[in-house]
Image (tube, rainbow, N blue to C red):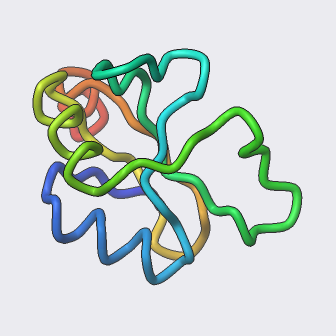
Amino acid sequence: MSEVTTDHETIREWAERKGGKPAAVRRTHKGRDVGIIRIMFPDAPNSEHEGLTEISWDEFFDEFDKRKLALVYDEDSLFSKVVSRESSEDRRH
């Protein structure tokens, strides 16, 4: 069962517990523009992170809040998806 959160500490703790790191999609990460953000799991088998570049948690959460995003995640797996807060409200109903 997936959960949805916008809480920075919850996101960071969940990701780090699973070996996750904040990342940006390389082709959208230009200069001061962070671009599209993701959580990458570099040690996970079959993880497709070649197109990602690691960023700081501060950069991740600045972009996360600026774009009004939420994280859908599964406590028991590596599944996560960054979505708009508006669409995350739809998931809760």
Q: Residue at x 35, y 27 (%)?
A: 34
- In front of the other: 23 or 80: 23
Tell me which corner region of the image, top left, top right, bottom left or bottom right, holds residue 64. Answer: top left
List x then y, in percent, for residue 10: 22, 69
Tell me which corner region of the image, top left, top right, bottom left or bottom right, holds residue 91. Answer: top left
How many numbered markers are drawn?
Answer: 0
Residue sticking out furthest to the right:
46
- In front of the other: 39 or 73: 39
Q: Residue at x 76, y 68 (%)?
A: 44
List x then y, in percent, for residue 71: 33, 46
Residue 87 vertical position relative to residue 19 in the rendered view, above or below: above
- In front of the other: 37 or 7: 37
List x then y, in percent, for residue 69: 23, 32
Q: Residue at x 16, y 49 (%)?
A: 6
Report the side of 44 relative to 9 (left or right).
right
- In front of the other: 62 or 5: 62
